[in-house]
Amino acid sequence: MRRVVVTGYGIVSSLGNSIEAAFGRLKELRNCVEASEALKGYKGLQTCLWAPARFERPPEYTRKVIRTMSPVSIMALNATEQALSQAGLLGDPEVRGGRMGVAYGSCSGGVEANADFYTVLVNNEVKNVTSATYIKMMAHTCAVNLSVHFGTTGRLLPTGTACTSGSLAIGESYESIAWGRQDMMIAGGAEEFSPTQVAVFDTLFATSRRNDSPELTPRAFDSERDGLVIGDGAATLVLEEREHALARGAEILAEIVGFGTNTDGRHVTQPNPETQARAIRLALDSANLSPRDVGYVNAHGTATELGDIAEGTALASVFGEARPPVSTIKNYTGHTLGACGAIEAAMSIEMMRHNWFAPNLNLDNPDPRCGEHDFIVGGGREMEAEHIMSNNFAFGGVNTSLIFRKA
């Protein structure tokens, strides 16, 4: 198999709209959760919390440029431009030559476009539907819009797998390059905020109700957790075959050395720690590493009871006494759904590059039901890690585990 490296990444998130800004905010040790006045207006919602990406559309994104894009695709476009620019590939003819593909995902397409589409059924009239409505709302809207905008002619791999959309896109891209199907891939995930997403988790009693103290939530793995907070954003990684990157003088940010994915095959919304552990072991096996070789784990960390206990149990069963340091980005950004796997992978790599790993915000009393772990707390941890792992798990029982090696 060929070696696969990361040569660029970009981000749009509540932490910031560049990797540098996001990492700087991470080091401030403050979350990005706010109380939303708009959410207070929805009857029946128990939560009014969110973690929004403050993203303003650049003036060069004219109507012609974004005619078929909803906010989810526009954020994906911006994150991808950042990543391609860092990789030295923005505007490069090789992007269009067939050896670069796109793997990108989200939970759903454009929310407003979906609403416009279904007014046909609700009102029995075709009023709000335009020639671009379906393109904005379809599940693979990000992947298609990125491919068309940048002119890629390689493979297209949409990954609409809920909260593993971004991580699965990275894993599928890794395998596409490792197996020689592509030389380069645009990989990532995005999600635009919608009250409907909040409502889904609210009806499952899975959202945080700390409406008067947003700075204290989410609190993944804490015994006083009370649920997740929905956020939004996008992140893109440019992956490349190592010799191809070296030949053109690209800076290598990290190397992907392991990927594992499987499904629970048991329940749509109740995670299975046994199959989660198996996905983690698949990643270790593909990287030819032992549990003791992993220097840090970025956890999925939903801050829900079922999610935290299942993930903690899975980690404990795999790592045992090795106990690598563990923290989660979601205590800062909230749960960004289809974007989280890509955002968390990018931030994990950035932390590895700076030899500093963020602590778990609001983790005061670890829940013993999650198992014994070296949870990072306090002011963060300065340390070197040659290998790091980023795990994500999704509705439908989709499990992913990625392992990166320091460049």
Image: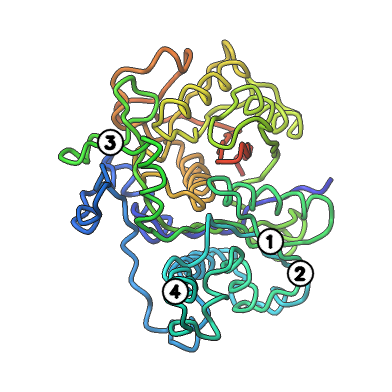
In whole angstroms, how far apart are the C-alphas of marks 1 and 2?
A: 9 Å
Location of mark 4 (residue): 119
What is the total number of numbered labels drawn onto the structure image? 4
Location of mark 2 (residue): 154
Query: Which colour assignment does the render follow?
Result: rainbow
In the foreground, 66 or 245 = 66
Q: Secondary structure at mark 4?
A: helix
In the foreground, 156 or 402 = 156
Q: Amino acid at mark 2?
A: Gly
Mark 4 or mark 1: which is in front?
4
Q: Residues within 10 Å of mark 1 (few under 14, many from 20)?
A: many
Relative image position of residue 340 (x, y in whole percent): 48, 47
Location of mark 3 (residue): 217
In the foreground, 138 or 235 = 138
**N-terminal-most mark, 1 or 2:** 2
Q: Secondary structure at mark 3?
A: loop
In the foreground, 225 or 389 = 225
Q: Is residue 104 left or right of residue 180?
A: left
**N-terminal-most mark, 4 or 2:** 4
Residue 185: mark in rendering = 1
**N-terminal-most mark, 3 or 1:** 1
Tell me if label 1 and label 2 are in contact, CB under 8 Å: yes
Mark 4 or mark 2: which is in front?
4
